[in-house]
Image (tube, grey):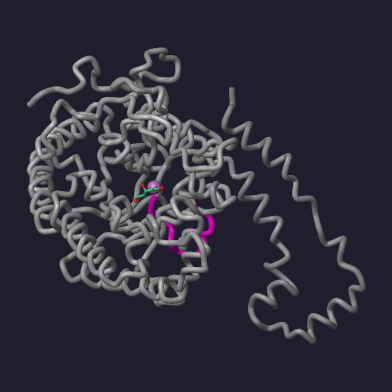
């Protein structure tokens, strides 16, 4: 089998003083952090769409990176992509991968022909995984948003035919996920939203989205899928308003339709910021509601208002992210998928490795800093003290359901004024603690 990246060695861990671009400075897969190796804590995944398919095409220009993998025939190219992906994962010590069905294998006219070709590629991947069991599928998903048939959505299309087609496509995608032993299946509402309410029956569209999710979940379980189903919230893009706006919105939707025990969240950093939230906020909402699942690691540009899907290099955000992940008990079926692409100007094969190294090192740094924040204990202690009034007296009575509104009125009347029960929020101090722990130079 051809080696695609002859000039790239297996990337070694060389430590913080290394200036070798093709080395990890912080990611040492075997280093133990809070009782688990970094490899187990971080569970990095390669995204098939950006890494194997994304060539830098944007609205203003054609691709800059060659992602043909030396093949012009679509089936030969799909197989070459598999070989190249496994080589990239090997060289970067990445154990997991994620795909959309159409990233693995394109459409070939009819759905039957497309399915047959997809099977061929999924079987090809399975053969490789059987030979190398260190490579695992983090999650699969169906690309129900690029073809013109999905112009008005898939599960929320006004056309029942498109709904049926989408269900059929997703059925195949979950079967492929099961065949490859995937530990997750993602629903990202590609065009599940609207441009104008003047032409939209929003109530019916949301009912239908829930119908589709229920069918897929029941079918997945019936064929032995034991992993997690995730929804990946995103507020806008491609539609003006996406139904899965943010984690809180999705939780409300899931509860309305009785799906809240069946679906967790795949939180993407750049989607959080598009929704005017921090990444940490979205992770906290998921954690507090018991639906934290997996992460699409990337970052946006604060000066741009769209989903730039940049490789994450912001160590501060990665620290607060890993703080939430550790507090949620770490990953179970989920992991850190790099839903990220090298910039259009970073077009060489080497850039694939340099950008993954940057992202992986950033999260290794984030993991180590988050572990230190937890061990340091000052943040936890501060929060505990701030809410101490709920552990005794009137606070405890409220929590225990013993205090009535009449009791509270009596209490407040006796006190007369309660401003002196408050203490400083100490935001600046706490931010300086985070700096001290991260930079500890
Ligand atoms: C799009 C996005 C998707 C999902 C999978 O913004 O994040 O690639 O991660 O469909
Ligand atoms: Co994503």
113 with respect to 336 (left or right): left
Which of the pair 321/194 is nearer the observer? 194
Task: Please count the marks in the image.
Answer: 0
Q: Residue at point 28% right, 58% down?
A: 149
Whether 292 is among the magenta residues is yes
Judged from this view, the residue extending furthest toward the right is 416
Q: Position of residue 201 (x, y in %)?
A: 45, 73
Q: Dividing the image into 4 quarters, which one contains the N terminus?
A: top left
Q: In this rendering, is residue 323 above or below 356?
A: below
Q: Residue at point 28% right, 55% down?
A: 184
Q: Dividing the image into 4 quarters, which one contains the C terminus?
A: top right
Judged from this view, the residue extending furthest toward the front is 198
Which of the pair 170/255 is nearer the observer? 170
Whether 287 is among the magenta residues is yes
Q: Position of residue 242 (x, y in %)?
A: 47, 59
Which of the pair 51/97 is nearer the observer? 51
378 with respect to 171 (left or right): right
Q: Residue at point 37% right, 41% down?
A: 339
Q: Position of residue 15 (x, y in %)?
A: 40, 20
Asked where in the image residue 344 lies, by quadrant, the reply is top left
Q: Position of residue 135 (x, y in %)?
A: 19, 41
Q: In this rendering, is residue 96 above or below 263?
A: above
The magenta region covers: 283-294
């Amino acid at each position: 089998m051809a080696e695609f990246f002859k000039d790239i060695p297996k990337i070694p861990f060389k430590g913080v003083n290394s200036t070798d671009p093709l080395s990890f400075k912080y990611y040492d897969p075997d280093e133990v952090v809070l009782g688990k190796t970094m490899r187990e804590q971080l569970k990095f995944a390669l995204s098939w769409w950006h890494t194997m398919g994304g060539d830098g095409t944007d609205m203003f220009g054609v691709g800059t990176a060659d992602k043909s993998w030396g093949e012009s025939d679509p089936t030969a190219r799909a197989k070459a992509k598999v070989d190249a992906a496994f080589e990239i994962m090997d060289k970067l010590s990445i154990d997991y991968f994620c795909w959309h069905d159409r990233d693995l294998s394109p459409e070939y006219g009819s759905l039957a022909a497309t399915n047959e070709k997809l099977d061929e590629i999924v079987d090809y991947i399975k053969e490789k995984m059987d030979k190398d069991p260190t490579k695992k599928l983090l999650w699969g998903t169906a690309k129900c948003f690029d073809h013109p048939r999905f112009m008005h959505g898939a599960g929320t299309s006004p056309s029942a035919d498109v709904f049926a087609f989408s269900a059929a496509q997703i059925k195949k995608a979950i079967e492929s996920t099961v065949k490859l032993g995937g530990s997750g299946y993602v629903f990202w509402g590609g065009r599940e939203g609207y441009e104008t309410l003047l032409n939209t029956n929003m109530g019916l569209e949301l009912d239908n989205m829930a119908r589709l999710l229920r069918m897929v979940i029941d079918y997945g379980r019936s064929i032995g899928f034991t992993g997690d189903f995730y929804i990946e919230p995103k507020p806008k893009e491609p539609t003006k308003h996406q139904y899965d706006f943010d984690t809180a919105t999705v939780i409300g939707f899931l509860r309305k339709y009785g799906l809240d025990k069946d679906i967790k969240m795949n939180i993407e950093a750049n989607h959080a910021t598009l929704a005017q939230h921090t990444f940490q906020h979205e992770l906290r909402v998921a954690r507090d509601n018991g639906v934290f699942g997996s992460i699409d690691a990337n970052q946006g540009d604060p000066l741009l208002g769209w989903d730039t899907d940049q490789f994450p290099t912001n160590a501060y955000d990665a620290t607060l992210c890993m703080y939430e992940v550790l507090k949620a008990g770490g990953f179970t079926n989920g992991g850190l998928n790099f839903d990220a692409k090298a910039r259009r100007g970073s077009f060489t094969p080497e850039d694939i490795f340099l950008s993954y190294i940057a992202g992986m090192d950033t999260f290794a740094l984030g993991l180590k800093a988050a572990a230190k924040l937890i061990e340091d204990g000052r943040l936890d202690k501060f929060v505990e003290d701030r809410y101490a009034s709920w552990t005794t007296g009137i606070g405890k009575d409220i929590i225990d359901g013993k205090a009535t509104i009449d009791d509270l009125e009596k209490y407040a009347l006796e006190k007369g004024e309660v401003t002196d029960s408050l203490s400083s929020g100490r935001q600046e101090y706490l931010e300086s603690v985070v700096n001290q722990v991260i930079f500890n130079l």
